[in-house]
Image (tube, helix red, strand yellow):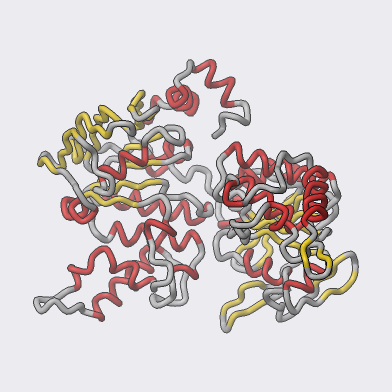
Amino acid sequence: MSKRFGSIAALEEVDFALFPGQVHALVGENGAGKSTLIHLLVGALQPDSGNIFVGGRLAHFRDSRQSVRAGIAAVFQELSLISSLSVAENIFVTRQPTRFGFVRKTELMRRASGLIDSFALDLDPARIVSSLSLAERQVVEILKCLAANPCVVLLDEPTSSLTHREKEILFRLIERLREDKRAILYISHHLPEILELADCATVLRDGRAVGFLKRDALTEPNLTRLMVGRELDDIYEAQRGKVASAVPRLAVTDLNCPGIFEQISFDVGQGEIVGVAGLVGAGRSNVGLALGGIQPADSGEIRLDGKKIWPESPRAAMAAGLVYLPEDRKTEGLFLRQSIRDNLVAPQLARFAGKTGFLSESDIDDNAAAACRESRVSAQGIWQAVGRLSGGNQQKILLAARTRLKPKVLIADEPTRGVDVGARVEIYQQLRRLTAEGASVLLISSDLLEILGLSDRILVMRSGRIVARFLRRDATEQQIIAAALGVSIASALDRASSKDVRA
């Protein structure tokens, strides 16, 4: 299949096949063509050329209803459930059993229970969806698509907002779908998930299918090489061996916020990256929010270049040189309906105001264009709405808007969450450029490889306290996990090998 949007080739002669009882992964960087391909399969778009065959029969989809009737159902990243309705009502939202125009509630519950039981799920069909966890809602979304009895199930980034334990629930459901002989197309940028679930994978790059890997060839190096078109033996290598200044750029002493964190003391040298590791709820992000002036601490001391400061607001923090990069770009970092240009200038309007207070539109345009070039943002232009960019390009815009403030210390909270491996590499390069120019980075991340690869020193938090400190050359995954869990190294090794602790 091929599909163009004006002069842009979104897909070029892509071939692939799905088989019953098989999980076929679709992998590629943001902008590689995955979304376009999915929209063709569900009838939201029509191909310029090429054919779709379902069960050996040629199919043409002018809308999503025709693709559903042909046996194709999709579960997208953004859930489409009605939170005020029950599980059963959501599962059969467009096909509820009726009589004389009234919904037959008993029959509705019977059908929903039968579908839930067929997959051995512990889910009450009468529960209101608003009371469900995110994982349970994702399961309901899948059951909703299965109510149409499809032969092909398309799963688009189904785990993007799930915890590890919630992912396990979803993976068990996918395994049942495989046993039920459904053909499954699984789209994800999380390579470990692909390696765990997939029987085979098709890799897209720049709108073309550049590789097909069977199970025995499914490795992270093979997938990465095909996705980005180059070898990535060690994407962190440039950071190792760098010597930071011994003079503290940021010094934090006995920072306290009762009930959240206490007695937080550390320093960050000029040009240094200090990583902060720990389990969810350990207080890592809260420390970042306090330093960024978003949720100020109650007591303690913060010194920047030796000068005592107390950031009571984001404006005060930025004025001092502390800039916070939020972990959730969509709700905390970007104006999704506004343009790239407006997002880039928003944190630094005063810089572009002349003596009269009026903004220099041409300077703002030049700033946006330069930021896009430097960050290698793939977009139609600086006036494109940020919400229409891929996740990786959104994250680049978020980072560029902060780094162009010339921070003394960048507090980077999960800087590569939800981006593919190619965008991840470019974000790492931006962080390295920042430290090479003399800035410092406090890196808060749940990715242990990221912490180990980028950091000069590592702090580990547990229950609101710093419980361990490591030099990069001395740290291992097992040591960090043991400190985060509060167990011995031997216990950490045992637990890290189990699926429960890879959280």
Is 15 above or below relative to 407? below
Residue at 38% across / 62% down in the picture?
334
Q: Quadrant of the N terminus?
A: bottom right
Count of residue discs? 0
Is 465 above or below relative to 383? above
Q: Quadrant of residue 95?
A: bottom right
Residue at 39% across / 75% down in the picture?
382
Relative to 459, 158 lies left or right: right
Q: Nearer the viewer, residue 142 or 44?
A: 142
Residue at 77% across / 76% down in the picture?
61
- Residue 60: x, y in percent? 80, 77
Relative to 121, 164 lies left or right: left
Residue 435, visible in the rendered structure: no
Q: Quadrant of the C terminus?
A: top right
User: Extreme right residue here?
Assistant: 56
Q: Nearer the viewer, residue 486 or 341?
A: 486
Residue 236, visible in the rendered structure: yes
- Residue 369: x, y in percent? 34, 73
- Residue 342: x, y in percent? 33, 72
Residue at 47% across / 36% down in the picture?
448
- Residue 57: x, y in percent? 90, 71
Q: Quadrant of residue 483?
A: top left
